[in-house]
Amino acid sequence: MPMSLPSTMRALQQTSLHGPQDMHLITDAPVPSPGPGEVLIRVIAAGVNFADISKADGTFGNGPQPPYLAGFEAAGEVVAGPEPGRLVVGVGYGAFAEYMVLPAAMPVPAGWTAEQSLGLVVNWPTALAALKPLGRVAAGETVLVHAAAGATGQAAVTMAKHYSATVIAAAAPAKHDVVRALGADHLLDSQDTDIAAEVLRLTAGAGADLVLESAGGAAFAAGLAATKPVTGRIVVYGLAGGDAAITNRELVYRHQVQIVGLNIGVLIQAAPQVFAELMGELAALIAAGVVTPARPTVHDLADGPKALAELRSRSTVGKLALRP
C-alpha cells in the first residue's frame, strides 16, 4: 500500500441488529488493503440504500454480523490498485468510510462527478433488470412502478418511458411532481388502499402488463390484483413494507400471474452474462442521455443514522448520499 495513506480512518460502525440508530462514527477503523484485482478508493460519496436498513435490522438475507462497517455503494478516487487517480463507482464492504475496497469498479462516466455516478451500480441496474431481462417489457405495455419517487423507482420510470411503455407510478402525493417530470403517464397515491382498482380503471379493466414491486406488505397484494391475468408479470426486488405471501391456491384460482424474484447481487453472481449485457445496455443509455447524472441529497458521514431514518420514514425523494 502507498506510504501516503493513513493506517486508520473515520467510518460508521453498526453495533447491533436493532436498526441504524445503533450505527456510530468511529475514528480508528483500519484502512483496508486491496487484494488481487481489487482497488482501494478514497470515498468521495457513498450511496444510501434500503438494503442498509435491512442489514441494520438483521432482516437482510445472509447479512453481516455486527460489529461491521456499514454501507456498500461508493464512488471515489482509486488510491491503490490499477489506474490510480481515476474515478470509479462500485459496491463492496464498508462504504460509509473514508476508504473502501472495491472488488469490481465501473469508471465514472466522462464529465460526471463521483457523486453524480451513485446509483449506476445499484439502482439503475436493478430497475433495468426488472424491466428488460426479467420483466420483458415491450413497447405499448403498461408498467406499474411502486415507490416511484425513490432512486430505483425514478430509474424505472425513466427507462420504461424510453422503452415506450405507459407508466402508472405510485408515490406519496408530495412527490408526484418529481415523478411526473420523469414522464409518468398516471400518478397514484401510494397510501391509497385501492391501487388495484385505479390500475384496472386506467387500463380499461385489463390490468398492468408488468408490475415492479419493492414495497411489500399491502402494496404486494394490490400489485397482484392489478396484474393482467396469464401474461402479466410481477418482478419483486424489495420488501420495504414488510413480508407478503401468496399461496399456490391463489396462483391457480385467483392471481394467474408470473412472479419473478430479483436480487441484483445474486444476478451478478449467478448470471454474469445477463449482468454484462445489462451493463452494456446501461452504457448505451448513458451515451444516449437517457440515464442522467444523479443529484443526490448529501449528508455528512456522521449523519448517516439520520439519513437512514429519513429513508425508512419515506420522507425522501431520489438518491441519498453520505460524504466522508
Image (cartoon, helix red, strand yellow):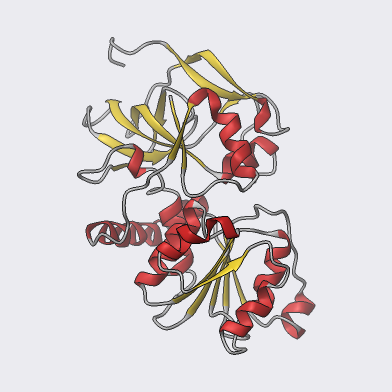
Q: Quadrant of the C terminus?
A: top left
Which quadrant of the figure contains the N terminus? Answer: top left
- Tell me which residue sits at (33%, 42%) in the image: 116
Quadrant housing residue 41: top left
On screen, residue 138 above or below 314? below
How many numbered discs? 0
Task: Note whether residue 127 is visible.
Answer: no
Q: Position of residue 307 (x, y in %)?
A: 56, 35
Q: Quadrant of residue 88?
A: top left
Give x and y (percent) for residue 291: 32, 57
Quarter of the figure with residue 171: bottom right
Residue 126 vs residue 264, the one in the foreground: 126
- Counting from the top left corner in percent of width and height, residue 44 is at 36, 29
Does residue 174 appear anywhere in the picture?
A: yes
Indicate whether 24 appears above or below 171.
Answer: above
Give me the residue at 43% from left, 21% from top: 32
What residue is shown at x 69% (from left), y 71% (from top)? 222
Residue 162 placement (x, y as % from top left): 35, 70
Image position of 269 with respect to 273: above or below: above
Say whether residue 118 is left or right of residue 283.
right
Tell which of 222 and 174 is nearer to you.
174
**Left or right for 243, reference 155:** right
What residue lies at 28% left-to-right and 29% top-to-bottom? 78
